[in-house]
Amino acid sequence: MADLRAPAGARTKKHIVGRGNGSGKGRSCGRGHDGQKSRSGGGVRPGFEGGQMPLYRRTARRGFSNVRHKHIFQPVSLAEVAKKFADGDVVSLQTLKEKGIVKGKDVQVKILSDGELDKKVTVQGLAISAAAAEKVQKAGGAVQA
């Protein structure tokens, strides 16, 4: 343990600026030549385009966007349900999380009909496509809202 070292180049010396030309960072201190950005406290605010009408003011902001109210579902195939669940199990959001099929806190799940199902499972409290619901019922399972 005593011979552990940081890899080469990981620990670089701190540049001390404004201490004369001999230091390598004297005079303009790495800020280039004169101008607004070379001054102490200088610079422009975010979005400023040198007096040109900025992009955020040039673009129109009209109409309605549904993006804040949009429901994004995480798809789960019937093949995955058949692989991870046994006969007579209940498929719910909690059991899907326990088996590691879905992750996340505020996740919404939709069961899709991709694959075959040969086990009697009860789908509870999840969104499910019509074709997937038909396959679940054909296998002897049930779909509860």
Image (cartoon, helix red, strand yellow):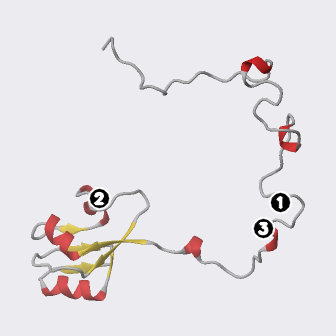
C-alpha span from label 1 to label 2? 48 Å
Q: Which residue is mark 1?
A: 49
C-alpha span from label 3 to label 2? 43 Å
Left or right: 21 in relation to 75: right
Q: Which residue is mark 3?
A: 55
Left or right: 88 in relation to 102: left
C-alpha span from label 1 to label 3? 8 Å
Residue 23 vertical position relative to residue 110 in the rendered view, above or below: above
Neighbour tally class for label 3: few under 14, some 14-19, many 20 plus, Cα within 10 Å? few
Q: Earlier in the sequence, mark 1 or mark 2?
A: 1
Residue 114: percent from left, percent from top = 23, 80
Neighbour tally class for label 1: few under 14, some 14-19, many 20 plus, Cα within 10 Å? few
Q: Which residue is mark 2?
A: 97
Residue ID at (79%, 24%): 26
Residue 34: percent from left, percent from top = 88, 39
Residue 65: percent from left, percent from top = 64, 78
- The answer to whether mark 1 and mark 2 are in CB contact below 8 A is no
Residue 85 vertical position relative to residue 34 in the rendered view, above or below: below
Residue ID at (86%, 34%): 40
Residue ID at (31%, 61%): 102
Q: Secondary structure at mark 1?
A: loop
Quadrant showing the C terminus: bottom left
Q: Amino acid at mark 3?
A: Leu
- The answer to whether mark 1 and mark 3 are in CB contact below 8 A is yes
Instruction: Point out the frontmost of discs 3 and 2.
Output: 3
Quadrant in which residue 72 is drawn: bottom left
Q: Amino acid at mark 2?
A: Lys
Q: Nearer the viewer, residue 37 or 20?
A: 20
Residue 126: percent from left, percent from top = 33, 74
Q: Earlier in the sequence, mark 1 or mark 3?
A: 1
